Image: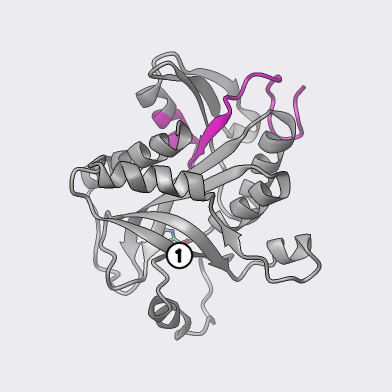
């Protein structure tokens, strides 16, 4: 039965779902990985596809940008469509000096300035962590050479609410870097919270698309695609572990 934001039927989604922010990227991922991909939902242009990779079922659905948006889709997937694991595949701004443009980050957990998770547990400072099993599968794939030498970092990220915040404290990024945070994005902490609510699994595999301390650093569009393909291989290893 369709939900408020997903016009699909029970059984239309695979147990594992990859979630990029951009629905057009969801379509590109689906068509690249799955010759048998079929469209299962397109409410509000948020495209979702299901097919198989090497005989194993997989779905890909856009999440939109920000924690409220990914929370809506993840909630409906877990609650109504039998989904067991969601792997966010997206981009992050690098903040750690160890992180370079195009590197891959496997997030073990996400600090956040959002209070979406606190609202779940009456003000408790919830620790938003990824599924250990999925982290291990992605890490094992990286160690086994899935990325062809592309650097991979496994550690903490920060999920923030504001992409543009002109009056923010200019010191917070260096402080986060000092505390070992690798990069900044806008969805993972909430995704980890929804997965915990439903007793399901979640992971975020991120490609570093820009460096917040070096705004001149840019990737070509070719680099973006090849680097993103590397992250996708780790995400697939987690999806089907
Ligand atoms: N913030 C800053 N830079 C970024 C982000 C973000 O959320 N995502 C990718 N680059």
Q: Report the predominant secondary structure element of the magenta stretch.
A: loop
Above or below, 6 relative to 55: below
Q: Residues within 10 Å of mark 1 (few under 14, many from 20)?
A: many
Q: Is residue 26 magenta?
A: yes
Instruction: Identify the residue at the far right of this view.
Output: 122
What is the magenta range?
A: 1-29
| Image-based side of 238 in relation to 165, left or right | left
Q: Can you tell me which quadrant of the image ligand 1 is in? A: bottom left
- Which residue is label 1 attached to? 156
Nearer to us in this view, 83 or 162: 83
In percent of width and height, residue 195 lies at 64, 47
| Image-based side of 11 in relation to 185, left or right | right
In percent of width and height, residue 145 lies at 22, 42
| Image-based side of 140 in relation to 151, left or right | right
Q: State which quarter of the image contains the N terminus.
A: top right
Above or below, 87 relative to 98: above
Q: State which quarter of the image contains the C terminus.
A: top left
In percent of width and height, residue 197 lies at 72, 49
Say whether residue 21 is visible. no
Above or below, 111 relative to 6: below
Q: Is residue 8 magenta?
A: yes
């Amino acid at each position: 039965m369709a939900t408020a934001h997903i016009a699909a039927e029970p059984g239309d989604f695979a147990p594992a779902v990859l979630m990029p922010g951009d629905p057009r990227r969801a379509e590109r991922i689906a068509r690249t990985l799955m010759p048998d991909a079929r469209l299962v939902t397109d409410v509000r242009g948020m495209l979702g596809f299901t097919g198989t990779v090497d005989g194993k079922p997989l779905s890909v659905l856009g999440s939109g940008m920000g924690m409220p948006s990914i929370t809506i889709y993840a909630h409906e997937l877990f609650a109504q469509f039998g989904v067991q694991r969601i792997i966010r595949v997206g981009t992050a701004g690098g903040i750690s000096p160890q992180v370079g443009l195009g590197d891959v980050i496997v997030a073990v957990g996400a600090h956040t300035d959002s209070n979406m998770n606190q609202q779940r547990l009456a003000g408790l400072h919830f620790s938003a962590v990824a599924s250990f099993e999925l982290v291990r599968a992605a890490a094992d794939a990286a160690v086994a050479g899935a990325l062809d030498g592309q650097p991979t970092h496994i550690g903490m990220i920060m999920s923030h609410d504001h992409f543009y915040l002109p009056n923010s404290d200019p010191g917070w990024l260096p402080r986060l870097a000092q505390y070992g945070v690798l990069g900044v994005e806008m969805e993972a902490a909430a995704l980890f919270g929804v997965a915990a609510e439903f007793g399901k699994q979640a992971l975020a595999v991120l490609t570093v698309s820009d460096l917040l301390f070096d705004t001149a650093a840019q990737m070509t569009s070719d680099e973006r695609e090849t680097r993103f393909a590397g992250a996708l291989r780790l995400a697939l290893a987690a999806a089907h572990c």
